[in-house]
Image (tube, grey):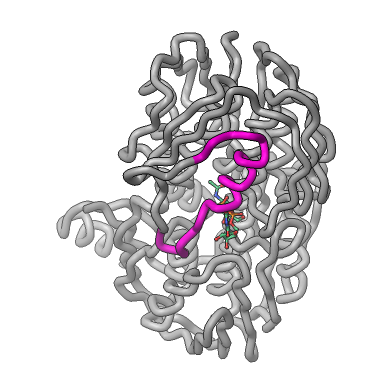
Amino acid sequence: MEQYIIKGGSPLVGEVEIGGAKNAALAILAAAIMTDDTVLIDNLPDVNDINVMLEAISGIGATVQRIDRHTVKINGTGIHDLNIEYDYIKKIRASYYLLGALLGKYKRSEVALPGGCNIGSRPIDQHLKGFRALGAEVDIDHGKIVAEAEHLLGTHLYFDVVTVGATINVMMAAAMADGTTIMENVAKEPHVVDVANFLNSMGANIRGAGTDVIKIKGVKSLHKTEYSIIPDQIEAGTFMFAAAATQGDVTVLNVIPKHLEATISKLVDIGCEVEEFDDAVRVVAKRRLKNTQVKTLPYPGYPTDMQPQIGVALALSRGTSTITESIFENRFKYLDELARMGAVIKVEGSSATIEGVERLSGARVSAPDLRAGAALCIAGLAADGITIVDDIVYIQRGYERFEEKLRDIGGLIERVSSEKDIQKFRLKVS
Ligand code: EPZ
């Protein structure tokens, strides 16, 4: 089983090129099958989740042509199967975006029910509520969602919960419904806007993405397009907190600073100097970080996908901090691992109280999920001594060339798969 081995104590210094947004790309790849023309998508992140989504799309008969690591051509003409097997859903929940895409285009789809995951139960009731509001018959039968409609009819829908997934999934189906759909209490994340822009580049008529109300005029068909995915604000924020936690000086390149406002605001709160450029942000941490209070919220609030990263920084800060996780019910598991590195933390329900310590000490830890895994690597880079991170397959799902990018800015981190590799690394860094 592969692991990361890390020697902490060196400040991270340098520039990091940020890739395309995984969570925008997953939805856009699903939406790409909604036309029978060929669609070209670039700035895709080369990560496991994207590869699984491409397998799912070609698995139902679409043509998928890899131009290079970050560029793909998709043509949905050959789709012969409207059934997305459990294997794909088990690997990535986001393959449920094919439900909205296939229902929009073919007025029928079968998708295996996604289970929960490491960060919570993650129901999909709002997705189903949206499809039913558009006139689809939606049944759950033997672990499958079966959705079909004679016609999808525009509707006026108010989501009970602000949900990225349901906003995107229902928006895709509504894009090819008859008439106008108004969706309220929607998610406003940059990747929701990216999917709306992508669909509009294919001839859809979607207005208001990024605000509380999205208005969609259904169209009969969608056409070819060439599209570039927005930069990944969560990958960018992860490296920005790595700079903060290691008292480094890191510039993230190819970003949209506006998407990072909540993250930048918290980095300033904890004592970092942050400089914004047109498509780059520089983070400098000259001294020990300060404590703060943070609550995760839907965009433009502080992102839940950046919660573990700030948790690591606050574990090393001066004073007492609190984190309130308001989006997912089980996203504090990494704090148990952090405590094994010397952090002083108390979790009560959806809140964690963190007493900052001067130093963390390296230990063997396990990545509980994608973002927490990346955060534990940051902890290892800031700690004294050697840290070994298990279950790094989670990290590779969403971060392209993670250890290489960290090494390029001075991080002492390697991917190992044997005791021999570990000994070699220990000798090299001792
Ligand atoms: C997306 O998940 C992201 N995943 C998550 O990122 C991210 O944490 C999350 O949005 C919030 O920003 C992808 O985009 C692939 P939600 P999603 O629907 O769409 C509740 C990562 O690390 N809810 O916005 O599943 C739900 O339980 C991943 O890249 C319902 O109650 O999140 C949660 O409490 C982790 N009913 C809240 O809404 C529903 O039908 C937000 O979930 C749907 C959601």
Residue 346: horizontal and vertical position, in percent?
A: 50, 89
Quarter placement of the C terminus: bottom left
- Judge by depth and name the residue closer to the eye, 307 or 363: 307
- Residue at (41%, 62%) from the top-left corner? 118
Image height of 194 relative to 384, above or below: above
- Judge by depth and name the residue closer to the eye, 181 or 235: 181
- Residue at (31%, 66%) from the top-left corner? 388
Residue 282: horizontal and vertical position, in percent?
A: 72, 55
Residue 236 falls inside the magenta stretch: no
Q: Quadrant of residue 248?
A: bottom right
- Residue at (52%, 15%) from the top-left corner? 73
Residue 357: horizontal and vertical position, in percent?
A: 53, 88
> Ligand 1 sits in which quadrant?
bottom right
Image height of 50 relative to 396, above or below: above
Q: How many numbered callouts?
A: 0
Residue 309 visible to the viewer: no
Residue 39: horizontal and vertical position, in percent?
A: 59, 15
Image height of 412 relative to 34, above or below: below
Image height of 343 relative to 68, above or below: below
Residue 128 falls inside the magenta stretch: yes
Residue 251 visible to the viewer: yes
* Residue segment shown in magenta: 117-138
